[in-house]
Image (spheres, rainbow, N blue to C red):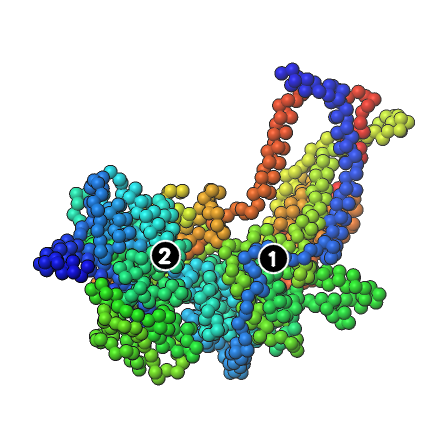
Amino acid sequence: MSLLSRFRKGGGEDGARVRIQRRKALAAVLWKRLPVIRAALLLVGLLWMVIIPLPMLSQGTYIDENALQPAQVTTYWNWDEVHRADRYLDQIEEWLQRNITSIEKADLLVTEFQKLGIPAATQHYSYTYGDKVVQGANAYAVFSSPRASGAEAMVISASWLSRAGEGDGTLNRRGVPTVLALAAFLKSKFTTHLYYSLWSKDIIFVLSDGYMEGMHAWLSTYHGSVQSNLHADPLIPSSGVIWTALNIDYPGHSFSHIGLFLEGLNGRLPNQDLANSVQLISRYTGGVPVLLYDQFDPSEFPSKDVLGLPAWLPESLKSNREFKEFAYRAKNVLRHVGYQGRGVASGVHGLFHQFRIDAITLYGEPAPGPHGFHAMGRVVESSLRTTNNLLERLHASFFFYIMTSPHTFLKIGKYLPSAILISVSMMFGGIGEWVGAGWRARAQERGEEKESEKSGSREVKWERQSRPLLPAVYIVLYTHAFGLAVFLALTRTPTLSPAITLPLFMLCLTSPMPILYSLRSLARPSSQVAIPTILKSTTLCLASTVISVTSVLNFSLAAITAVLLGIPLTLASSSPMLPVRTVKYLAYACLAFGWMLGLPGEMQRALWSWEILGVWFAPFVCLVYAPLVMQAGLVCLLPM
Amino acid sequence: MTLALKAIPLPLLLYVLGTVASSTPETFHEELTLRPLRDGKVISRFSFSTLLGGAIPRNPDVLDAGNTPQHYSLFPLGLGQVLREYAATELHLSLNSGKWEYDRWGYPDEQEVGTGAQLWAWIGDGGQATVDERWKGLRNALAGLFCASIGSLDDQRTTSPTLAFAPEGDLPAWPLPHHLRHATLPSENVCTENLTPFLKLLPCKGLSGLASLLNPHRLFDADWHGMSVHVSWRARRGVEVRLAFQAVFDPVRMSTDRKRDWSLQSIFDRTIPKACPIAESSRIAVELPKNEAYAVDPRPTSVQDGVAVYDTSQVNDLDVSLRWPLESVFSYPLDHPAEPLSQVSVQRTLKGTSQSRGQLSVSIANSLPSEIQAIYLETMPWHVQFYLHTLKIVVDGQARDDLLSDIAYTPPEPHGRPALLESVLTLPPNSTTHLDMEVMKSFLRYTEHPPDAQRGWDLPPAVLVNFTPGGRRQRLYTRTLLVDLATPDFSMPYNVIIMSCTLIALTFGMVFNLMTRKFVVVRLKKGEKASKEKAD
């Protein structure tokens, strides 16, 4: 007891006073420096984003899951299989010359599987999108591995259209024969009979129609999550839980490198172990160099300009090795951010991730040589053996990364803080505005002022004022509801032509009219004064929360949002002059909705991705991003 | 010795043998059936049955009485002791690996083809030990006898589906009834360590007779393989133990020239060196192809109904082969067979991708022009709970809830017992019936996760019992399923410990601070006023 009382007395009253004063002084310093702190956080965050491609931030890739054992097996794929693949290719060329329909083509592919003794079937599907109907037919086969229960499966797939040109009609000319020859190889190669029975999982061969849509129909039917605008046949030969998938994309005659494509829908990534394994296998078993996407490494081609650097850059910089390395990695990171931020898949493999399947695309970079079916087959065979080794799910921590080159990557701790710092800066700003809105400087009496000037301290009388939160919240709700209305208008319109988007844009510009009108009718003009400040506070807090929550789900989207919102939202402020206010507002409105007129193609693609594949980018822009910018615009527009 | 034998009067010698023969007339029969399939595969089935004539199962009431000595000459002693100790009247154990494809292979000769281990027994009630105690003992004894993890078929996996698993033999009319105990373990596989004790139960072991073909190197490389043990009692005859081994081979993949010709040598890598001398009957039955040119060698003892039979009770180095001499390369049949090999085909999948909910969907195709009554049995460990009220039956796009009748449902008990759904299903002719049920995936306690690799949880196969045109009860097993339950990242306990300790320390610090602090009003003197918090 005595100890406790002594403890209580501890500092004594003087000590407490000192402590309180110290705390107050610290708060005052922080408060005084708040704009500097905010600006510093914002700038450090933005700078961090710029230096993400620096080689010193990256580290070398490694295999985390010991069971994978990549590139450790003898491969049996040989020239017989290359010959067989060539025969399949001849057959497909012949079908193409006959100009057969996709349904006939799927039937013929199924016959090829049945000739090998593998149960196969077709799946017809049709999407209704607006007033259009997209139809097609998939062919797939299930190789039930002997002795296995069929509870687990791996997928080898090839879409009919290649990702080269994002499904603009380039055929995956040699990807489909590779899958067929692989099926024949696994089923019937005599030298493989010794390990024919070692597969621990069923192997499903999927030859999907179209680019994305065929595989999407197949996968959603397989997992029983068919959306309302899709009609697809049920899958009769079925198998178990799919663990991994390899998508083969080989459009050209030969290839020089294998490109790895990782990004999936809504920013999902496959487990990095899979990409690392394939990278090692490709290098050591297939003897094929690996690319990230289809981006060549300047260190491999020192004499060629593979980066496509802008012409205005000085020649000394262009030939600088360090700069070229930085530019190479920056291109890869920007490519990644472009796919992940918009939520689009960089290949057909991207559809798998939503079903917890690790999948990547192996892209044969078209070139005059030197590699062909022989190398591709060996890489795929060895990769299958590697994924066949899996006894358990790949490790949970290996889904957060940014690849800067095929064999270097950034861990989450090296890139996540950049967006978080911007978000923290905005949150400080929001809280600062909220505190500031509660105080009002009172005009001081003349004599008092003089006295204070004499004493040298700037004494200002502050008095509390009420903070009208509700009107600000109504404005926030209104802008988000307006965003929803815009989104519905865009999705319900069958064809989006400038004749529709232009009036819609004008409507967006005039959307604050009801707010201005209702604010004018507010009885108390004194409270109206603080509304822009309160609104700015809520907007900043909301945007900060959105960025920090999104950053762990889809870092690229969070980064794009942080870059687009960080400075504009921080700088938004009202002005006494109406023309200035209007100009500022129009600038924000263009930032919010300008994509309607400026990027019609991008908008069409995003809406298509939402309708068919369920990509959240379009709703995110309409319901979250644009309303937040509009709120900043209203901060500018509302009178002080 | 011969002199001594001669010294015994002949009538006396006959008398001794006669009493032995009449008290326990044990007989041993062995049979191998080989059936080529349309897709070039060959089903082989070994069946070894030992009959203990005149014996009756032990009444559990006399379990406490002292043990009487057991003398068997052919009947497997190891199994006999287990049956006596736990007074099991009927017992069926199967250990299988692979997935039986009814559509392409037809109905199996041994119908217990569910993936993994399955054990079911009819046990009489009575005596000191309860049925469940004896079921537990039986499991553990069989686990030891066959080197399998049947011991883990605990209460969380045991059910009593009496409709689907009716006794195959007779049950003695004791005052107290018999009870069924049934359990499956889908992740258990059969391998060499199970075959060795299996062979030890045979009177000729693997040395002679048909059992000499049981070459583990080949059997366990087969596309499908499984062994089973069946004990049943026939009122007039006695207790019968039947050991069976079934395997599906693929001669096409084993041949260099891609032909489907096979012989015992090519399939088993062995021939039959000599007959088992104590077998009452021993035969090989080869089902001959229909409407095709074939050559079977050597000449069979007899041919009946397209089945070539070889009597192997007197053989010396026998190798049976079946060839298709006109065929240079085997080509797989292309279109769907006009006559499906099984009239009913079942497909069961678990859909849905979340870790909390899913959908169990079963589709059953009846290709017969007549209606079929079938028993549908679903046993689920409590990890996956299905909601019976969400059960929907759809035939050709129309809801047909009337097709399901006589529903017996035992709800699951979390951390305790599995769910059991047993009902009679009417399958309309030439149609596919879809059953859909919503399921909920449980959240496990952390100690309930196995210490193995995290690949998910195997769910036992559903069973559909229908009656074949011959009137035989035919059990169909579906594929097993794998379900992903929410799993913590077990490789990160260190991080978790650090995190939780930090939180506890912070909470404690704050609470302790508040509890020991004295709150007083401190007046700041005018002169030492800190800079005003609202400076600008």
Q: Residue furthest front?
A: B3
The kind of residue on which mark 2 rests is Asn
Quadrant where the C terminus of chain B sits is: top right
Q: Residue visible at 34% across and 83% down?
A: B325
Q: Chain of mark 2?
A: B
Q: Position of B283 compared to B420: left or right?
A: left
In the structure shown, which secondary structural element does the residue marked by tag 1 occupy? Answer: loop
Residue B194's disc is 2
Q: Nearer the viewer, residue B370 or A373?
A: A373
Q: Chain of mark 1?
A: A
Residue A569 against residue A156 in the figure, above or below: above
Q: Residue visible at 44% across and 55% down?
A: B482
Residue A150 on image: x %, y %? 42, 61
Residue B218 on image: x %, y %? 39, 67
- Binning the other alpha carbons within 10 Å of mark 2 as few (below 14), some (14 to 19) or many (20 upward) gives some
The residue that disc 1 covers is: A63
In the structure shown, which secondary structural element does the residue marked by tag 2 occupy? Answer: helix
Quadrant where the N terminus of chain B sits is: bottom left
| Residue A310 shows in the view | yes
| Residue A129 shows in the view | no
Q: Residue furthest left?
A: B11
Residue A622's disc is none
Q: Residue visible at 46% across and 64% down?
A: A198
Q: Residue visible at 64% across and 26% down?
A: B513
User: Mark 2 or mark 1: which is in front?
Assistant: 2
Badge 2 vs badge 1, beta-carbon distance below 8 Å: no
Residue B147 on image: x %, y %? 37, 53
Q: Position of B267 compared to A392: left or right?
A: left
Residue B113 on image: x %, y %? 33, 60
Q: Nearer the viewer, residue B198 or A6?
A: B198
The kind of residue on which mark 1 rests is Ile
